[in-house]
Image (tube, coloured by chain):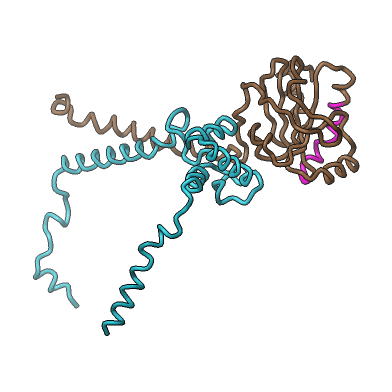
Amino acid sequence: MRHVLILIALLLAAPLDAGALVGEDPQEARVREVATQLRCPVCQSENILDSHSGTAREMLDLVREQTAEGRSNAEIMSFFQTRYGDYVLLSPPASGPGFVIWWIPALLAVGGAGLGLVLVRRLKRRGPAAGPLRNPLSVRDLEEMEP
Amino acid sequence: MTDTVHPAKRPIRWKYFLGALMLALPVLLAVGLTRDPGKLPSALEGRSMPSFEIPYLAQEGTLDSAAFKGKPLVLNFWASWCVSCRHEHDELIRLGLRSAAQGDFRVAGVNYRDDPDRAQGYLAREGAFPYPSGYDGKGRLGIDFGVYGMPETFFVDAGGTVQMRHAGPLTDAVLARALPKIGVTP
């Protein structure tokens, strides 16, 4: 029994260090980080890491080269931004026309909360609702209704 | 304070505001539906053309952007694998002949992500351009120009500023709109 327990413990412990064993080259990790934030201009709904288009492959090579040259993530992103515009960034910048995209959800949330507040206040002003709620059914009423 | 005096006024103002908001959203979405999501604006328009020096497709030497200084330029990206390039082929040949005859503007081609032999075969089949094409095998120049599909044509004025980018085949209507922007009568 003890051997079995040790075996299970060892099996469970084995993957703990797996991250260190298959540790990614930090430079390649940065390439991946940048590449997942850039949109493939050809397929338009994939990032350049996932895309198989030739343009995306070439863009990935450029990211790799520039990372090796020691350029920062921001520098590499702006390299593509000056060529393809904001469109190439998968998260649009919060400035310029892109700010609409970021603020519409907040605007809708505020609008919805406002609407809810107005409705609640109106209901409160009206007082308790008229109708059956004013004379709720008693236990006897319910018993009488049972077939 | 006004709340206590006119308790009924506030909700009405809110109603208008929310009504406007609910109307504005479908209008915004409806406008969005009329636009072609495949068409991307060019980041290059209004900026100076990237400088380049790439080998020619069919001859020795390089296609050098410095050689185009001082004259308006029509720069066309094409490929043998591109179907719509065939639709604009005759238009480009006409434009090239006109440029050669009048000399008031230049035309140049960039063969993009292509196999040089196939590109040559394409020109033999469809008719050679009356102007040289550079060869951009890996598409690096295309990335510098923000190219995303074939064909694309850039209209650059005499000062070297990109005035317009057209994605898709060139037509008389497109040229009539684009050429005046670089100071050329269509």
Residue B40 magenta: no
Residue A1: image x %, image y %?
A: 27, 85
- Which quadrant would residue A123 be assigned to in this image? top left
Q: Which chain is brown?
A: B
Q: How many marks?
A: 0
Q: What color was chain A assigned in the picture? A: cyan
Q: Is residue B18 left or right of residue A76?
A: left
- Looking at the image, residue A118 lies above or below residue B51: below
Q: Quadrant of residue B63?
A: top right
Residue name at image x 17 percent, y 30 percent: B7
Residue B20 in picture, x, y percent from top left: 39, 32
Report the magenta residues as a range: B81-96
State the residue at coordinates (55%, 42%). A39
Name the quarter where the C terminus of chain A is drawn: bottom left
Q: Is residue A69 left or right of residue B174?
A: left
Assess whether residue B84 is covered by the magenta stretch. yes
Location of residue B13 with respect to A146 vertically, above or below: above
Q: Nearer the viewer, residue B178 or B76?
A: B76
- Say left or right for A40 vs B166: left
- Residue at image location 49% in from the left, 39% down from the top: B29
Q: Position of residue B182 (x, y in %)?
A: 72, 18
**Overall secondary structure of the magenta section:** helix
Seen from the viewer's position, the closer of residues A125 and B18 is B18
